Amino acid sequence: AQSVTQLDSQVPVFEEAPVELRCNYSSSVSVYLFWYVQYPNQGLQLLLKYLSGSTLVESINGFEAEFNKSQTSFHLRKPSVHISDTAEYFCAVRNTGTYKYIFGTGTRLKVLA
Amino acid sequence: SQTIHQWPATLVQPVGSPLSLECTVEGTSNPNLYWYRQAAGRGLQLLFYSVGIGQISSEVPQNLSASRPQDRQFILSSKKLLLSDSGFYLCAWSVGSYGYEQFFGPGTRLTVL
């Protein structure tokens, strides 16, 4: 069955330090991959997505993620975090032939001053 | 542009009372619609999804039900709420067969006492 694993439930990091949030998925078919961000008491906002083509995708606010098919991973990285990046981050996967999205349990990123 | 509305924003209900949460999408036609529940520390749980009027797929057997009376309206209901129904309920939509990412509403915080 399809699943998404986010191994880190919480990640504390100091401001201006780099961060990596890990995401691994299991699927036997082609997938679309997504990272969403959620601020307290709000809905989820799309951060970036991998559909096809270049395996490295970037967001407008400095995040990037790399699709690694052999490792079945889609880790999220940022070279220098800001206080405003404090939020919960969700990885999601959707098989190309379905309408269902499977989400990980989320990683709470806390940026410390 | 497309927008998604959910109401109410917050709700406090006694155990055994009925529930009706509404979600509407504007600016698109024939969207795929989804209901998720988010419990603390447990990520997003897909409850129902619909790819057309009157079509509902249920993912988790429980005391909740969903209906889609109009193309862009999705309703989540219960006849008798349980304590375990407390959580943050999110509605989302994606675009038809070619839709990639999902777009989320602002959510409804339900507390069952």
Image (cartoon, rainbow, N blue to C red):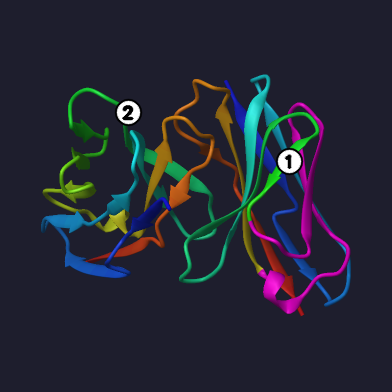
Residue B80 placed where, x, y %? 86, 69
Residue shown at the point (31%, 61%) measured from the top left: A6
Question: Numbered disc 1: what chain?
Answer: B
Residue B75 on the magenta span: yes
Residue A63 placed where, x, y %? 22, 42
Residue B84 placed where, x, y %? 68, 75
Q: Which mark is residue B56?
A: 1
Q: Could you tell whether B33 is left or right of A13 in the image?
A: right
* B98 shown above or below A28: above
Neighbourhood count class around disc 2 (C-alpha, 10 Å): few under 14, some 14–19, many 20 upward: some
Residue shown at the point (11%, 58%) measured from the top left: A17
> In which quarter of the view is residue B30 placed?
top right
Q: Which residue is mark 2?
A: A51
Secondary structure beneath dot 1 equals strand
Using the rendered image of the protein, determine whether residue A113 is visible from the camera's viewpoint.
Answer: no
| Callout 2 and callout 1 share a chain | no
* A2 shown above or below B24: below
Using the rendered image of the protein, determine whether residue B56 is visible from the camera's viewpoint.
Answer: yes
Q: Could you tell whether A15 is left or right of B25 in the image?
A: left
Amino acid type assigned to the residue bearing label 2 in the image: Leu
| Quadrant location, the C terminus of chain A | bottom left
Comparing labels 2 and 1, the label whose residue is closer to the camera: 1
* Segment tinted magenta in the rendering: B60-86
Q: Pick the residue in front: A35 or B58.
A: B58
> In which quarter of the view is residue A19 placed?
bottom left
Question: Numbered disc 2: what chain?
Answer: A
Q: Could you tell whether B78 is left or right of A39 in the image?
A: right
Residue A37 on the magenta span: no
Secondary structure beneath dot 2 equals loop
**Cα distance in 3D space between marks 2 and 1:** 26 Å
